[in-house]
Image (cartoon, helix red, strand yellow):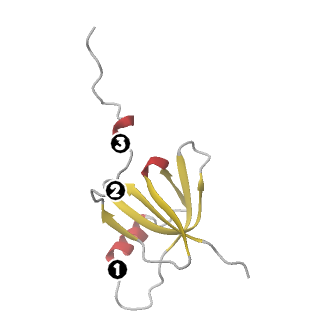
Amino acid sequence: MAIKKIFKVSFYNQGNVYEVYASKVYQSDLHGFITIEELKFHERTSVVVDPGEEKLKTEFDQVKRFFVPMHSIIRIDEVEKQGIAKISEAGEKIAHFPSNIYNPTSDKDTSS
C-alpha cells in the first residue's frame, strides 16, 4: 500500500494567513503560481467544531484545485500527520514580498 503524502501549506490571502493541508502541491503551468489540490479536512468525530476549519471548508467547497501566487506562499511542509486547517491574522514577524508591485493605480511620474 502506497503512503499518501500530506503537505501543510501556509500562504497569505487578503491580510490573513491560511494554513491548509493537501495531497498535491506543485508548480503550476500558470507562470508564478503554485497549484494546490485535494484539500484535507478533519472528519467530524465529536460535537466540538472548529469555526476556523469550518470557514475554510465552506470557502473551498466545490473547489477541485486552486492557484496561489508564489509571492504569497509562506512555506510548504511535507508532514506525517494532518493537522487542523485554520485562518489567522498575519503577524508582524512574517515578511512577504510587497503586493503593490502589480498595483495599476500606483503614482506615475507626471513631470515632463
Which SS class for mark 2? loop
Q: What distance separates the C-alpha of mark 3 from that of mark 1?
A: 32 Å
Which SS class for mark 1? loop
Residue 54, x across and y down, in percent: 38, 74
Identify the residue at horizontal 47%, vertical 48% (top origin). Answer: 69
Callout 3: 10 Å neighbours few (<14), some, many (20+)? few
Tell me the residue that label 3 is attached to.
98
**Residue type highlighted by circle 1:** Asp
Residue 50, x across and y down, in percent: 34, 80
Total number of numbered discs in the rendering: 3
First in sequence, mark 3 or 1: give its number: 1
Q: Nearer the viewer, residue 31 or 55?
A: 31
Q: Quadrant of the C terminus?
A: top left
Tell me the residue that label 2 is attached to.
94
Q: Is residue 59 left or right of residue 38?
A: left
* Residue 19: quarter of image: bottom left
Residue contact at pointers 3 and 2, CB within 8 angstroms? no
Identify the residue at horizontal 47%, vertical 60% (top origin). Answer: 75
Comparing labels 3 and 2, the label whose residue is closer to the camera: 2
Residue 26, x across and y down, in percent: 60, 56
Q: Which mark is residue 50?
A: 1
**Residue type highlighted by circle 3:** Pro
Q: What distance separates the C-alpha of mark 1 from that of mark 2?
A: 24 Å
Does residue 66 lie above or below 105 as drawn?
Answer: below
Q: Is residue 58 left or right of residue 89?
A: right
**Residue type highlighted by circle 2:** Ile
Does residue 37 lie above or below 51 as drawn?
Answer: above
Residue 46, x across and y down, in percent: 40, 91
Which SS class for mark 3? loop
